[in-house]
Image (cartoon, rainbow, N blue to C red):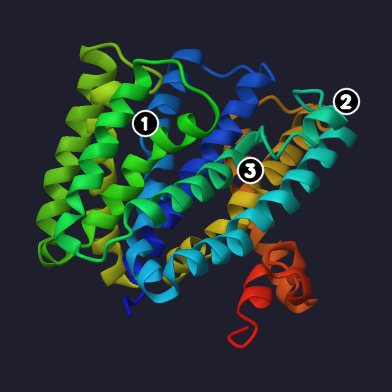
Amino acid sequence: MQQRDDWVDCAKAIGIVLVVYGHVARGLDSARLPIDEGWFELVDSIIYSFHMPLFFFLAGLFFHDSLTRRGRLGLIVNKVDTIVYPYIVWSLLQGFCEMALSSYTNGHVTVGEVLSFPWQPRAQFWFLYALFQVFVVCSLVYAWKEKRYFLAPAVLFAALYVFRFDHSLSGFLFFVLNNAVFFSLGVWFNEIKKSFEARRTESALIFGGLFLAGQYLFHFTFGLNYKSGGMPLLGLATISILFIASLSMCLARLRFNWLLFLGASSMTIYLVHILAGSGTRVVLHKIMGMDSVAIHLALGTLVGLGAPLLLQFAIKRYNLYFLLTPPKPISLSSLTYPRSA
């Protein structure tokens, strides 16, 4: 069985900090606080060029091991419990909170919008919506067990990714074609992971240089942004992901326990950070009348990371696990495989 690697939690920690910061900054821009538009758009594009592809890549790392161990049906059943359930619970919780606080926030949410989550994911929850679809598709694509074929799906999904930007797609095809390439890159990366780990410092330096050069060429030389898509964005995202992977392998050797904890808690942070970050902005701006962008960014990011961790502690302390995982009577895994539950 494939063991969990500390570097994966380091990579998740880097990714989730970027997620929280990106959403806090976007909230400030939407609220029309005095943020420098040029700087905001550049940093926003750099972050969005790779941070969510990174999470699909990391999800793909353990996919084949899980597929082999659980089987196709068992894998999908497990993802219903671990992805679909929190998607439903937190789409409703966040949606109704946004409705209740709509007079203080940047948008006005209706009951119909909240209840449309089965076909129209809201806010950050699109990731869970797309991730489950990618798992289902890849459980069919990777039905064979021979690893020598793992590069082929990555190449196929790369071609479909470029195709998707040349055509107007929506719904299921949009979510799968836009993200499966990075998931399949994670599946294939296991074949070269040991080489990266053996040369982690050199890899971090090489891909760090490529990351800086690629971001500069993409944004300044060619004047593109993350919405441009196509082959340039695919190449930039791939380089960026490999840089984060090699950097995380270096960081894992240093054993920063707080970083590992942050990465291991990334799911809880992802589910809760919008409520925490938006709430911080409302308190600072609407109640305290504070317009300092630096303070908003710093406190919004810190609270966006810290509040979910406090909730996670409360969940464990007061046995509120139903907020993250389905209770046994409605757990699909327990109903389908009662002996292993």
How much space separates mark 3 and mark 1, taking CA atoms? 24 Å
At 79% from the left and 28% from the top, the residue drawn is: 105
Foreground pick, 25 / 185: 185
Above or below, comparing residue 162 to residue 23 in the picture: above
Foreground pick, 9 / 84: 84
Residue type highlighted by circle 1 = Ser
The residue at which mark 3 appears reads as 299
Point out which mark residue 49 bears.
1
Element at label 3: helix
Mark 3 vs 1, N-terminal side: 1
Residue type highlighted by circle 3 = Leu
Mark 2 vs 1, N-terminal side: 1
The residue at which mark 2 appears reads as 103
Q: Residues within 10 Å of mark 1 (few under 14, many from 20)?
A: many
Q: Nearer the viewer, mark 2 or mark 3?
A: 2
Q: Residues within 10 Å of mark 2 (few under 14, many from 20)?
A: few
Mark 2 vs 3, N-terminal side: 2
Residue type highlighted by circle 2 = Ser
Element at label 2: loop
Q: Nearer the viewer, mark 2 or mark 1?
A: 1
The N terminus appears in which quarter of the rendering? bottom left
Above or below, comparing residue 321 to residue 115 in the picture: below
At 57% from the left and 65% from the top, the residue drawn is: 77
**Number of numbered markers:** 3
At 43% from the left and 70% from the top, the residue drawn is: 71
Image quadrant where residue 202 sits: bottom left
The answer to whether any part of residue 38 appears in the image is yes
How much space separates mark 2 and mark 1, taking CA atoms? 32 Å
